[in-house]
Image: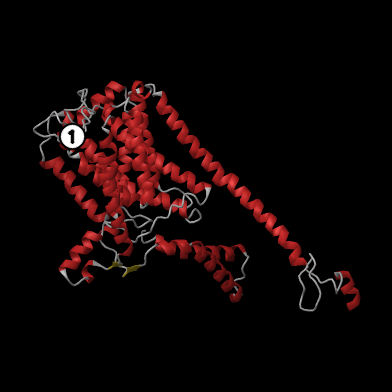
């Protein structure tokens, strides 16, 4: 949560009171009426944000705006001018056209990032997250550029980034021998296990540790982890690197790497929820150790909110959670398919940079999605980072479809189709039962119960010995017309 968000509820309440005064519904000369309306609006705002206070930690802030919260327009202008003067007057211009083109594009991206990061914003986000928002825009533009190229030109364009790219990938044997204990190898019978212990093992662990910090829910993480293994089983006829041994799928990936990463992530979430959030200015901290910790914690959340997805509470949240799981799985698949269609080896640094990119933008996107789901009255629009990440995921998939439609359209085995059809059918049946049949049945039973209780309430004795009628009047006193005649 950022600093302005902590003040929005009070501002919104004050704004609604001001609108009522301007519209004439509240007389400014009558302070009692204005005070009553203001108290009513504040009570409604407090009731709407009650669940948020239960899941959000308390924050202490002395009000000091640090370097990363302030705009630095003059400083950035001075640094940019000095850099351009150096390039123009002091540096000798290289005669390599390709190098000059890459440097020009890099400089344009750098200037764009500096402009967005250090300009004055209406929302006081820390500069680090504004930088990654700018990188998100640049990456989406790059993907659209690749999407509009021909297949040959798009693959050859990767040579401008790295001359080693743009060549077909060699064939590899990913399945191989799946024996855990190989009696034929007397030197090392467990060589199949040791062969799997490569750099991707810590990458799996670290990846799921960070994903847990993004999603903040154990059940959703485990569902995504298991579902991706089913996707690997289902798509191994398309990509060879999806063909793994059974113990590599369920023991190495789900239990060891993914499971341990999710466990450590949940422990970190528990620590973050109990951690005191006390923010002080750097020069208000007396010790050097405290100053170093303050600098390190600058890039941690301003406050902490426990995510309560509650997918079964209503149909809207259920569909939203299904959409989040679908986009997560699609982004995971794009990692493998993009490497395949753009001819990038798995160990290439561009693959790692893409993962680093999603690590930094995914957390902000998930927070924006949760705020949009949790309080639609407060967050009426989906956040810009969440919107861009969704657009990037779809654009990556479109690149895969355009660059290699033959691989995507390979016929799926009938057994896999039957399994997925059964799974989707079960989800649809549960959705219809939970949010339509069950709710209609409960509403019918509640209505019937109220109708059965209503006659008993009408015939209950009052204090004067009479009984209550459906109109709320006593039988002893008669109708309202009779009462008026008696009074006259």
Residue 381 picture location, percent across and down? 46, 49
Residue 51 picture location, percent across and down? 46, 61
Q: Secondary structure at mark 1?
A: loop
* Left or right of 458 on screen, residue 128: left
Going 38% across and 44% down the picture, which residue do you hit? 223
Going 76% across and 78% down the picture, which residue do you hit? 463
Q: Which image quarter holds the C terminus?
A: bottom right
* Left or right of 404 on screen, residue 480: right
Going 32% across and 68% down the picture, which residue do you hit? 61
Residue 243 drawn above or below residue 294: above
- Binning the other alpha carbons within 10 Å of mark 1 as few (below 14), some (14 to 19) or many (20 upward) gives few
Residue for badge 1: 181
Q: For the view shown, which residue lies furthest in the front direction?
A: 183
Residue 346 picture location, percent across and down? 21, 33
Residue 403 picture location, percent across and down? 32, 24
Going 23% across and 64% down the picture, which residue do you hit? 294
* Left or right of 409 on screen, residue 296: left
Q: Which image quarter holds the N terminus?
A: bottom left
Q: Is residue 473 visible?
A: yes
């Amino acid at each position: 949560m950022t600093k302005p968000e902590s003040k929005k509820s009070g501002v919104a309440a004050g704004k609604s009171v001001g609108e009522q005064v301007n519209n004439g519904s509240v007389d400014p000369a009558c302070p009692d009426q204005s005070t009553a309306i203001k108290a009513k609006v504040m009570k409604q705002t407090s009731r709407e944000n009650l669940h948020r206070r239960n899941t959000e930690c308390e924050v202490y802030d002395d009000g000091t705006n640090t370097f990363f919260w302030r705009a630095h327009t003059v400083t950035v202008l001075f640094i940019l001018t000095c850099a351009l003067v150096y390039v123009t007057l002091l540096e000798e211009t290289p005669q390599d056209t390709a190098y000059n083109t890459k440097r020009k594009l890099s400089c344009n991206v750098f200037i764009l990032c500096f402009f967005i990061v250090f300009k004055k914003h209406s929302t006081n986000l820390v500069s680090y997250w504004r930088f990654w928002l700018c990188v998100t825009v640049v990456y989406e533009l790059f993907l659209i550029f690749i999407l509009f190229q021909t297949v040959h030109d798009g693959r050859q364009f990767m040579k401008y980034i790295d001359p080693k790219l743009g060549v077909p990938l060699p064939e590899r044997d990913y399945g191989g021998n799946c024996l855990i204990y190989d009696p034929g190898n007397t030197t090392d019978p467990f060589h199949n296990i040791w062969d799997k212990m490569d750099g991707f093992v810590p990458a799996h662990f670290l990846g799921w540790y960070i994903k847990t910090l993004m999603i903040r829910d154990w059940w959703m993480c485990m569902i995504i982890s298991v579902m991706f293994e089913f996707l690997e089983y289902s798509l191994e006829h398309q990509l060879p690197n999806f063909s793994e041994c059974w113990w590599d799928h369920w023991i190495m990936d789900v239990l060891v790497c993914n499971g341990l990463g999710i466990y450590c992530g949940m422990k970190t979430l528990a620590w973050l929820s109990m951690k005191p959030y006390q923010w002080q200015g750097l020069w208000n901290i007396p010790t050097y150790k405290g100053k170093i910790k303050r600098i390190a914690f600058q890039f941690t959340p301003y406050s902490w909110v426990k995510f309560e997805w509650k997918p079964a509470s209503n149909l809207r949240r259920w569909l939203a959670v299904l959409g989040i799981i679908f986009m997560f799985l699609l982004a995971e698949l794009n990692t493998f398919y993009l490497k395949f269609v753009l001819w990038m080896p798995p160990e290439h640094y561009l693959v790692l940079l893409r993962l680093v990119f999603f690590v930094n933008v995914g957390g902000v996107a998930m927070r924006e999605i949760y705020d949009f789901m949790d309080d639609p009255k407060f967050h009426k629009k989906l956040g810009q980072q969440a919107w861009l990440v969704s657009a990037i995921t779809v654009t990556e998939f479109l690149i895969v479809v355009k660059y290699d439609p033959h691989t995507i359209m390979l016929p799926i085995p009938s057994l896999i189709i039957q399994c997925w059809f059964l799974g989707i059918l079960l989800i649809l049946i549960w959705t219809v039962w939970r949010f339509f049949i069950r709710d209609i049945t409960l509403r019918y039973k509640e209505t019937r119960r109220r109708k059965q209780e209503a006659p008993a309430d009408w015939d209950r004795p009052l204090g004067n010995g009479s009984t209550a009628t459906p109109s709320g009047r006593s039988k002893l006193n008669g109708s309202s017309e009779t009462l008026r005649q008696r009074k006259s």
